[in-house]
Image (cartoon, rainbow, N blue to C red):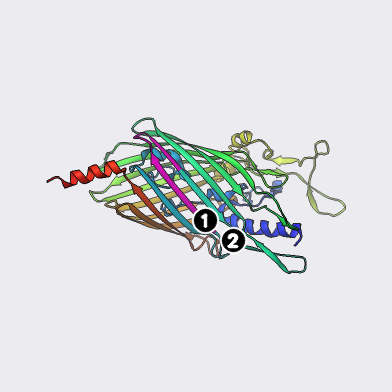
Amino acid sequence: MTEDKYMKSILSTALVTLFVSKSFSQATSTLSTTQLSGALNPITTSVPFLLISPDSKQGGMGDVGAATDCDINSIHWNGSKLAFAEKQFGTGFTVTPWLRSLVPDINMYYLAGYGKLNDKQTVGGSLRYFSLGNIDLTNDQGIRTGNFKPNEFAIDLCFAQKLSKYFSLGVATRFINSSISRVYFQGSSGNAASTVAVDLSMYFKSNKFKLSDKKAVATAGLALTNMGAKIKYSNDQNFIPINLRLGGGLKTEIDQYNSIAVYTDFNKLMVPSPPVYSTAINPATGQASIVIDPSTGNKVIAKGKNPNVDVVTGMLQSFGDAPGGFKEELKEINIATGLEYAYNNVLAVRTGYFYEPKTKGGRQYLTFGMGFKFKVITVDGSYLVPTSLRNPLQNTWRITLSFNFDSVSKTEEGEKEGAKP
């Protein structure tokens, strides 16, 4: 198999796989100025698997997680929530078969855990592994020469600190590795691409207060995730999905055993928006082509800003570089909302909705989930239902198994107190 044909096979598989996560083509937009109104102009990034919801609890609530209660998988959503962990330590594992309507062997696995250092400090870690299945390699004659299993993974370490009874900060570091561009050609192999990133987050959780005749708790969270260097697959460097997540929540106790909570998140990718380039008719061919500045050799931008900038500049200009102006900037904000009913801290029923404008990727779906807790074991499941027919995301489900423990001394103390007459 030639190198070009192999690369096309790898990239085609990757693009089909990752399109539903966030418009995953590496190509630059070439919209004309007459196509701005209602045009498809999604923001593109590399390693978009980092944006896929890795767990069942938040996955059952429309992928909302900035201000939900702390759990095993908080590092992905808002690492600072770990400072409010109620148990001494815990661990959990999630499996997510991905794009089952298209391919049979793409899966994401997520292993996470945490441990409290004291009442104010907590450390955590996670491993996310995204398998893109098996690709058969053939030569120019169509004879099978082997196979290749591309994959991507990320390893996280997080530290969360309570600054007060109500407020915490968190920082996480992340190593990211992607082998989707690795090339096997005439017995040699290319190198996987990798980079590092940092998350900064904060979380607020109020005391119980009166809401009508009920007791309630308000929460709020802010997380800047995947802030890191560009990743290089070949000669070009690509932004990773730097994301701003802002959310709030309200949990109300209906009575001693029943509670209901509602949460909402707003997400914004902090990477450059694809600009609109000037086009002109080529007299020789009669076809439109992008105008090139002869003095610089660069494409001439008609609307928007230059996307080939450094990471910090890209983050800052992402709030005002959409070629369609402020109206298009608003369309780059995704909204997630979720609802959770819990009975006696044992059974939970969840639902949610995720909305992304069609011109920016069009992910729009309902989610449903349930959770059951028995002593230290918790089992959560979720199911995703797209609002459009024949959507690659249909039949997406997740299962999470987690364990939460108190320290041995605290457990023994509780047992002794329980044994007193």
Residue drawn at x 43%, y 51% as measured from the top left: 58
Instruction: Give the SS element for disc 1.
Output: strand
Q: Which residue is mark 2?
A: 133
Observer able to see residue 298: yes
Amino acid at the residue labelled 2: Gly
Residue sitting at the far left? 421
Is 172 in front, or is 308?
Answer: 172
Q: Which mark is residue 108?
A: 1
Task: Describe residue 101's horizontal placement relative to residue 416 as left or right.
Answer: right
Residue 199 locus on image (x, y percent)? 51, 38
Residue drawn at x 80%, y 42% as measured from the top left: 292
- Mark positioned earlier in the residue sequence (1 or 2): 1
Q: Which residues are magenta?
A: 107-124
Q: Report, in whole angstroms, how far the alpha carbon at label 1 lies from the one at label 2.
A: 10 Å
Is 132 magenta? The answer is no
Q: Is residue 224 above or below residue 11?
A: above
Q: Quadrant of residue 176?
A: top right
Marker count (numbered) = 2
Instruction: Give the SS element for disc 2.
Output: loop
